[in-house]
Image: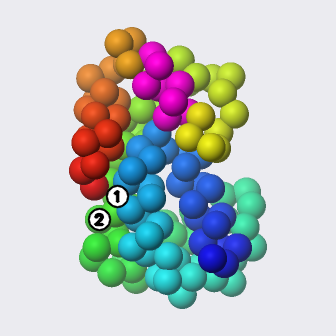
Amino acid sequence: MSKTILAAVAILLVTSAALAQTRTAVKACGKEIETHCGDVQAGGGAVRDCIKTHLKEFSPGCQAAFTRVAAAAKACATDTKQNCAGVKPGGSRIEVCLKAHFNALSADCKAALSSTAAGHT
C-alpha cells in the first residue's frame, strides 16, 4: 500500500468515528486515491484536501463513500470533543472512546456508530 493511501487512511481515521465506513472507502477507493492524489506529500491534511479538491474526479461510488465518512465524522464531532478530547487519534481509540460513552452521545452520533457496528456503509 503506498504512502499516499496510508496517509488517506490515517486522515480518515483521525477525523472519523465511523471506522467501518472509512475502511470501506479506502478499500474501494485506494487506487483512485493513488491516481488523483498520489503525488501529494502526506501531512498537514494535504491528502484530505486533495481528495476534497478532486472529489468530482472520483467515481460515483468513491464520492458516496467519502461523503458517508464525512457525514459520520460530522455527526460525532461535538461528541468527540466533549467525551474524548484527551484521546490520541489512531488505532480505533476515538471509536472505542465514543462507544464507551455511548449513552452520553447525541442521537446523530449514536446512529452513525450503530450503522458502523451493523456493517452498513
Kind of residue indicated by mark 1: Thr
Residue under the image location 34 percent in, 69 percent down: 63
Q: Dot 2: within a 10 Å radius of its alpha carbon, few (fewer than 14), some, or many (20 or more) residues?
A: some
Q: Is there any visible trace of residue 47 in the rendered image?
A: no
In the image, the segment drawn in magenta is 94-101
Total marks in image: 2
Find numbered disc 2 in the image and state the secondary structure of the residue it sits on.
helix
Q: Are marks 1 and 2 in contact (CB under 8 Å)?
A: yes
Which residue position is annotated with label 2? 64
Q: Percent from the top left, x then y, of residue 89?
A: 65, 39
For the N terminus, give its image quadrant.
bottom right
The disc placed on residue 67 is 1
Residue under the image location 47 percent in, 82 percent down: 32
Q: Which corner quadrant of the image does residue 58 belong to? A: bottom left
How many angstroms separate mark 1 from mark 2 (CA)? 5 Å
Residue sitting nearer the eye, 43 or 90: 90
